[in-house]
Image (cartoon, grey):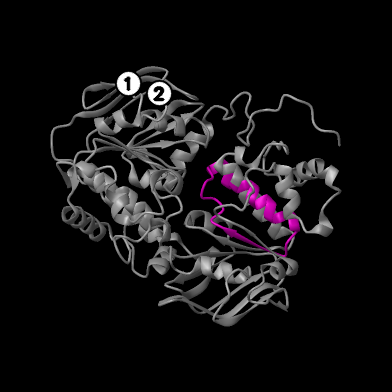
Amino acid sequence: MTQELVLEMRGVSRQFGAVRALTNVDFECRAGEVHALVGENGSGKSTLLGIASGFVEPDTGEVRIGRAPLRTDSPAQARKLGLAMAYQDTSLVLAQPVKNNLYLAAPPGQRPPYWRRKKWSRQRLLDLDLDLELFPDAPAGALTLADRQMFEVAKALASDPKVLLLDEPTTALGPDEVDALHRVVAACRDRGVGVVYVSHRLPEVLEIADRITVLRDGVGQGTFEAAHTTEPELVEKIVGRPFDAAFPHPESHVGEPRDVLVVDALQGQSFGPVTFTLEAGEVVGIAGAEGNGQAQLFDTLAGRTPPRAGQVFCDGEELALVSTHEAVGAGIILLPGDRKGEALMTVLGVRVNATIQTLKQVSMFGFLRRRLERKSVEELVDRLEIKTPSLEQPVEFLSGGNAQKVSVSRTYLRQPSVILAYEPTQGVDVGSRFDIYSALRDRTAEGAAMLVKSSDPIELSGLCDRVLVMSRGQIIEEIPGDELDETRIVEAIVRGPGLSKAGRSPLGVAMPTMGDEAE
């Protein structure tokens, strides 16, 4: 491997008001290496990437791309020097088609004639071997979340960069998409591109990275060779304390065994029939490659999409599931995977978001009892260790982990019978992730049953009592607790039937019925 540095940051510090985001941090990335950057939310990773890409100006320090110094306030110069970045929240123009997004991402000197952009964009994506069946005329907004993330990476590569920054590139991806992305990253490394890889998913980091730098509270904790580092060692460096058990030991539910949720031959959009039962105090996982009916199953159980056939019983009462109001009233609460879009009102504060579904419990004769509401939320903030300057802090300014804890807090106030947790730790840092595991296990210890959909096999094997594997909308296998481990889950997913739906592309958009435009 060449030792040429494509990104060099020395003595970088940055302070926002009273908060020191970074303190004298050194970081470098060599040509032809994958250098991972890890740490909890709030550790300074995003600030460091912002400084490297020219969007954030450091208080002190120097940044070089290649051998050229970067003006500290110039994203345009960073791109000109050869740096590209794929953002976690994507920078796509959703109303514009794929071909236009890719065309705009390329430097003017590397763009084809405007009328050839469709053929050019298709070839660019095929060259990346992303296993995508590209339809350049499809608007970017029609892509699934997973395919938007994959396309964000492809867009960043349109400029043929010397150094590529990937900010949480696998947050919305399933195992197959992660493998495809890692093939692209490996190909970049082979071409001599330096890749800075930011992720909370430590197994992925150890799989793809050559070196790993750890940040904690804005201070560098060292750089380590990935081949000589284990996951427990990495967790300890990130959280700053020994970590003996990643997952909470399940506490036995006190009470007689009973079936809380009974699903019998349930069918809905893109899934079914499925049959399973959840017992009080039980955590059951849903595994499977993305796009095999998991999201639709959760939407139906939450009352968001009415079922087409079958029966659902909660606490012995049959439900029609024609509305979310009915599901919530019966004791079923959904924790959506898209916190910002579906779970939280981000412009409102912690207090409002925590109590929005439980106002009757903190009201009398139709009037809100402010003192009782504040007391209830303060207790939850302490119990869940939610880091917020005040109860009125808008959720949009909290880290991903703390925002998710606010969402989880609702399950304490409402006392549901069934919790539907869809990707409960997506985009959440290591320390907050384990706090959330403990919080969810606390709920089941008090008698709730929980159904968890996760794309992380390690999470499923550590958190769940048993796992159901879905493929093509059906449950194809049940893995009991005494057989649960990462390998067993992955094997069950891989052995499943084919994954594509007829008439749909891997990009999640409808197959075109009209001919291509003239090339």
**Disc number for residue 320:** 1
Image location (x, y in percent) of residue 519: 86, 37
Kindly identify the residue that appears in the image at 35 percent across and 61 percent down: 393
Residue 63 quadrant: bottom right
Amino acid beneath label 2: Pro
Q: Is residue 8 left or right of residue 336?
A: right
C-alpha span from label 2 to label 1: 8 Å
Residue 342 relative to residue 51: left or right = left
Q: Which mark is residue 306?
A: 2
Proximity of marks 2 and 1: CB atoms separated by less than 8 Å: yes
Kind of residue at disc 1: Ala
Residues in magenta, as a range: 149-178
**Residue 19: where, in percent of width, then height?**
41, 75
Instruction: Say what secondary structure mark 2 lies in.
Output: loop
> Could you classify mark 2 by the number of other residues whose Cα lies within 10 Å: few (under 14), some (14-19), or many (20 or more)?
some
Q: In the depicted view, which residue is nearer to us: 294 or 89?
A: 89
State yes or no: residue 469 in magenta.
no
Quarter where residue 300 is shown: top left
Is the residue 389 above or below the residue 450 in the image? below
